[in-house]
Image (tube, rainbow, N blue to C red):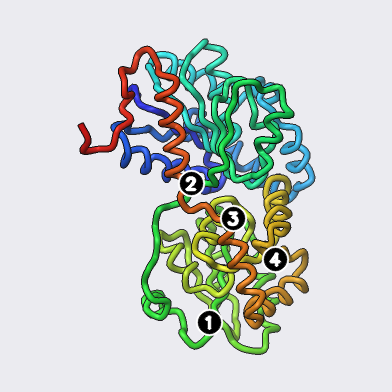
Amino acid sequence: MKSEPIILFASFGHGHEQAALSLQKEIISSSSFEPELIDILSWMPSLLQVGLRSSYMMMIRHKPQLWRQIFKQYTKDKVKDYKHVKWISLALGKALSSNQVPFVISTHPLATWIASHIKQQYDLRFPIFSVITDYRFHPSYITNEVDVLFTIDETAKEQLQLSEATHQTVYQTGIPISKKSIHADVDFLKNKLQVKKEQATVMIASGGTGLIDFPKILAALELLAEPITVLCMVGHNSHMEKKIKQMTSKHQIIVQPFTSLFIAYMKVSDVLITKPGGLTISEAMANETPLIIYEPVAGHEEENAHILERWGVALFSKSTTELLHDIQLVLTNRVMREHLITRANHYKKPDASKEITKYIFKYLVEHPLPFYDAPLGVQSRGQG
C-alpha cells in the first residue's frame, strides 16, 4: 500500500463503489494525489464476505422489518465489537498505521465507523472525510474521529449542531456521480440502442443487485392501452434476466444487464421506475428523467423515498395500482412531467464530486500534516 489517500467503500450493492470511483477520478484529475480504492469487505476471508453479503440480501428481501430496526440502531460503538468488524479493523488498521496516509474518504457508514475505530485505536492523525450517499443525514454518521461530512440533506447542519460533535464541518454538496454526460440527439440514441422511436419508453432500474420485482411491474404494464418500450435494467441479476426473457408481452421488452451505457438508456426514457438508491436518483435528476419510486429497501431507501416525494422530485407508488396510475400520469400529463423535471433541477447537484474535492483540498491547506510539505500535492496537473 503506497502513502496515498485511501477511499473506502463497502460492496453492498453498486452505488458506494461508483461514488468512490467518481471521487477518485476527480482527485486524480485535479491534484498530484492518486487515491487507492479499498473495498473493506475485501479485507475479510472470502467465506465471511459471502456470508455477510448473503445475510444482508436475505434481510432486505425477506426480513425488511429486521433490517429497518438494525439501520435505526447502528452506530460505531455498537458495531465495533462484531466479529467481521474486528477482523477488518485489525487487518486494515495495521496497513494504515504503517503508512503515512494523508487522508481517508469513506462512502459507506460501516467503512466510516471502521476508519474511525482504527484512527482512535492506533492514535492516527489522518483526517476522515465521510461522504453520505443517501438523502437523509443519519445521526449515526457523526463520530468524533470524522472531520468533514458531505451530504445532500439540507437539515444536516442543524442536526450536527444538535449533536455532541464540536469540531466537525458539514457541506451540502450532493452525492458524487459519474461525470458522463450524453449530448447526443434522443432519436440518434434510440437508434443506437435499438429502442423504437414511435413509442413511449419506460425504464425499470433495480441497482447493481437487481432487487426489484420486474415480473410484477411488467404484468401491471400489460394493462396500458398503447404498446410501449420497457427497458429492464437487471444489473448483475442473471436469474432475473432469464426470467424476463421467458415472459411474453405486447410491449417491446429490452433486458439489459449491467452496462456502461446506463446514462444513455436513461436519456431515452420518458420515465424511470426505480428503487431510491442515492446514485441512481442523483443521475436521473442530473439527466432530467422523471422519476417514480417503487419498492424501496427498508430503512435508508424508505427515508430516501419520503424525502424525494416531499421535495416533489418523484412520485412514490406504494402499490401496483398506484404505479400504473403514476406511469400513465407521467406519460400523458405534460404539466406533471414538467413539474418533476423542474423540481429535479432545483435539487440536483451534478458537480458533487468537484465540490467535495474542493472542500477536501481546502481542509488540507488549512490543516497541514507534518509529513506532507506544502502544498500537500494539491495542485492541478500541469501546474508548477
Q: Residue at x 44, y 20 (%)?
A: 367
Q: Nearer the viewer, mark 1 or mark 3?
A: 3
Which residue is disc 2 drawn over?
A: 352
The dot on residue 347 is 3
The dot on residue 252 is 1
Residue furthest out toward the top: 123
Q: Residues within 10 Å of mark 4 (few under 14, many from 20)?
A: many
Which residue is disc 4 drawn over?
A: 315
Q: Quadrant of residue 259 in the image?
A: bottom left
Q: CA distance from mark 2 to mark 3?
A: 12 Å
Q: Residue at x 43, y 52 (%)?
A: 178
Q: Residue at x 66, y 63 (%)?
A: 314
Q: Amino acid at mark 1?
A: Gln
- The quadrant of the picture occupied by the C terminus is top left
Q: Nearer the viewer, mark 4 or mark 3?
A: 3
Q: Are marks 4 and 2 in contact (CB under 8 Å)?
A: no
First in sequence: mark 1 vs mark 3 = 1
Q: Amino acid at mark 3?
A: Tyr
Of residues 235 and 100, which is closer to you in this image? 100
Question: SS for tag 1?
Answer: strand
The reply to whether residue 289 is visible in this rendering is: yes
* 99 shown above or below 22: above
